[in-house]
Image (spheres, helix red, strand yellow):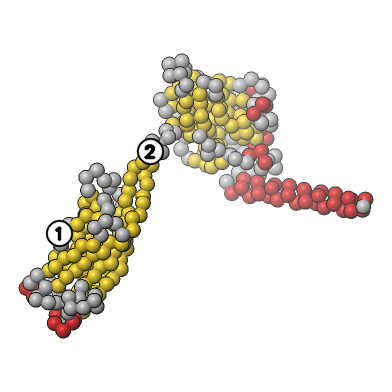
């Protein structure tokens, strides 16, 4: 039994070593991929949930530079910046050069955005923001953006939010990494309001919609010219449609055109699936072709299908041309309808 416990202990230690080495390798690969010298103190577990990406452009709302940074390196109290305006509100940056210890900031530099001058806001106020905090790297002449992808909810009880683990101190204070050049550190912030959408766009598909069959009889076929003829409009779903055809050519094409929208409809790309049919007037041997497409908002956009040779249409024994007239039909199988509904 003791031998089994000893074996299990060895296995556990081996697994721990492999896991730690794998994590360390992942950190090294990610760091080297960003062209920053590898720093083994950059812990994977302490940075889960945060996203760090590079950007050339400086932050839009606030830039804070502190010279002689080493003087304040070990001070626990934060530096609080002057007031700046962003997204219609007043803010201050709060920088903990030695990390905010009660927010997991041990061995890190911590940075927060604090909303201020909230006395004029209504009772029960809440400000939802997308917060991006920045650290400048002079070696690369780029800004490291730190964010977690979460909406920050400021209210009367929570006025200061940010990241306790903005960047490890070992990385920031290492002169080779480029974050503290000539003992100067530069930080920044961008703050964007996140307003909840009041409406959402909902696309539904209607199979066999009402009045979905439109029949078009074309008279005086033999006198028609070599051009596209179009039918009257017909309404299916929230959109008007037209049929079209060209009486000349080797094959007889049929077109389906999406037109304008009915009053008060939401104008968006419309799905249309239809059977386009050249009807046989003597029997049920109709020529049917299926078509489907996302029709653009632009009126008059059409899609065509070929049916049968023009010679077969003109052959009176075939039954498609009777009394110098043909019949084309559209059976709208499915159409999409777009609505704006409350969230």
Which residue is painted at 11% across and 73% down in the image? 325
Q: Is residue 11 above or below residue 309?
A: above
Mark linked to residue 304: none
Marks 2 and 1, how far apart at CA: 36 Å
Q: Residues within 10 Å of mark 1 (few under 14, many from 20)?
A: few
Residue 244 percent coordinates (x, y):
18, 65
Q: Is residue 181 above or below residue 253?
A: above
Q: Which residue is mark 1?
A: 232
Q: Residue furthest right?
A: 2
Name the residue located 26 percent from the left edge and 51 percent from the top edge: 238
Question: Taking 106 as reference, is 10 above or below it?
Answer: below
Secondary structure under the numbered disc 2 in the rendered image = strand
Residue 319 in sight in this render: yes
Q: Residue at x 52, y 31 (%)?
A: 152
Label 2 Cα crowd, 10 Å radius (few <14 / some 14-19 / many 20+): few
Name the residue at 24% across, 70% down: 277
């Amino acid at each position: 039994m003791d031998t089994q416990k000893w074996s299990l202990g060895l296995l556990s230690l081996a697994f721990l070593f492999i896991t730690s080495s794998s994590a360390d390798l992942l950190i090294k690969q990610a760091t080297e991929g960003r062209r920053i010298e590898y720093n083994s103190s950059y812990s994977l577990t302490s940075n889960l949930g945060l996203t760090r990406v590079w950007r050339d452009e400086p932050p839009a709302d606030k830039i804070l530079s502190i010279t002689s940074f080493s003087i304040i390196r070990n001070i626990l109290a934060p530096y609080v910046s002057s007031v700046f305006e962003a997204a219609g509100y007043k803010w201050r940056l709060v920088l903990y050069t030695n990390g905010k210890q009660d927010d997991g900031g041990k061995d890190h530099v911590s940075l927060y955005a604090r909303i201020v001058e909230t006395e004029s806001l209504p009772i029960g106020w809440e400000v939802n923001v997308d917060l991006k905090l920045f650290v400048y790297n002079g070696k690369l002449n780029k800004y490291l953006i730190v964010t977690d992808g979460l909406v920050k909810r400021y209210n009367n009880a929570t006025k200061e939010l940010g990241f306790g683990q903005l960047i490890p101190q070992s990385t920031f204070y290492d002169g080779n990494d480029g974050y503290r050049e000539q003992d100067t550190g530069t930080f920044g912030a961008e703050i964007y309001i996140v307003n909840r959408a009041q409406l959402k766009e909902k696309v539904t598909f209607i199979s066999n919609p009402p009045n979905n069959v439109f029949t078009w009889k074309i008279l005086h076929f033999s006198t028609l010219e070599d051009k596209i003829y179009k039918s009257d409009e017909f309404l299916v779903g929230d959109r008007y449609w037209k049929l079209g055809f060209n009486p000349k050519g080797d094959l007889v094409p049929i077109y389906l055109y999406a037109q304008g929208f009915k009053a008060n409809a939401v104008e968006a790309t419309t799905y249309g699936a239809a059977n386009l049919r050249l009807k046989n007037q003597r029997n049920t041997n109709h020529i049917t072709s299926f078509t489907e497409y996302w029709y653009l908002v632009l009126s008059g956009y059409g899609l065509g299908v070929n049916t049968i040779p023009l010679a077969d249409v003109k052959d009176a024994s075939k039954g498609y041309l009777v009394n110098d007239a043909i019949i084309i039909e559209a059976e709208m199988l499915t159409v999409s309808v777009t609505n704006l509904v409350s969230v």
